[in-house]
Amino acid sequence: MAGIGFELKRLFRRKGLFATMRAYGYAGIVCTGPMLLGVLLQVGILVLCGLWGVGRGNQDLL
């Protein structure tokens, strides 16, 4: 993860509106990516539980 920080520093050094927007966009993707992956995996598990007939109470425990 340290390499990502160095690359973001390099992007933030550039001047201009487009360069700044690009740097903030990359930073947002890097920060929210793991969270979105976790949410998608949780939804996938719940869908599989629904297909296999797991009770709603047990799904809520997940």
Image (tube, grey):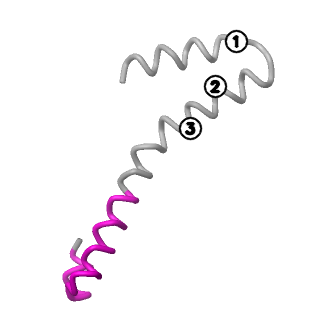
Q: Mark 2 to mark 1: distance in Å?
A: 9 Å
Q: Mark 1 to mark 3: distance in Å?
A: 17 Å
Q: Mark 2 to mark 3: distance in Å?
A: 9 Å
Residue 49 in percent (x, y) is at 24, 77
Say whether disc 2 or disc 1 marks the residue closer to the N-terminus. Answer: 1
Residue sitting at 80 percent across and 24 percent down?
17
Say whether disc 2 or disc 3 marks the residue closer to the N-terminus. Answer: 2
Q: Is residue 60 magenta?
A: yes
Q: Do the numbered discs 2 and 3 sit on residues whose CB atoms are within 8 Å?
A: no
Question: Hey, which quadrant is residue 25 in on the image?
Answer: top right
Question: In the rendered image of this protein, does residue 56 appear above or below residue 62?
Answer: below
Q: Do the numbered discs 2 and 1 sit on residues whose CB atoms are within 8 Å?
A: yes
Residue 50 in percent (x, y) is at 29, 82
Residue 29 in percent (x, y) is at 53, 38
Query: Amino acid under label 3?
Result: Gly
Q: Which mark is residue 23?
A: 2
Task: Describe residue 2's horizontal placement relative to residue 7 as left or right.
Answer: left
Q: Would you say the magenta stretch is mainly helix, strand or loop?
A: helix
Query: Which residues, given as a range, are shown in magenta?
Result: 39-61
Residue sitting at 58 percent across and 31 percent down?
26
Task: Describe residue 42's horizontal placement relative to residue 62 as left or right.
Answer: right
Residue sitting at 37 percent across and 18 percent down?
2
Q: Which mark is residue 14?
A: 1
Q: Residues within 10 Å of mark 3 (few under 14, many from 20)?
A: few
Query: Amino acid under label 2?
Result: Ala
Q: Quadrant of the N terminus?
A: top left
SS class of the residue under badge 1?
loop
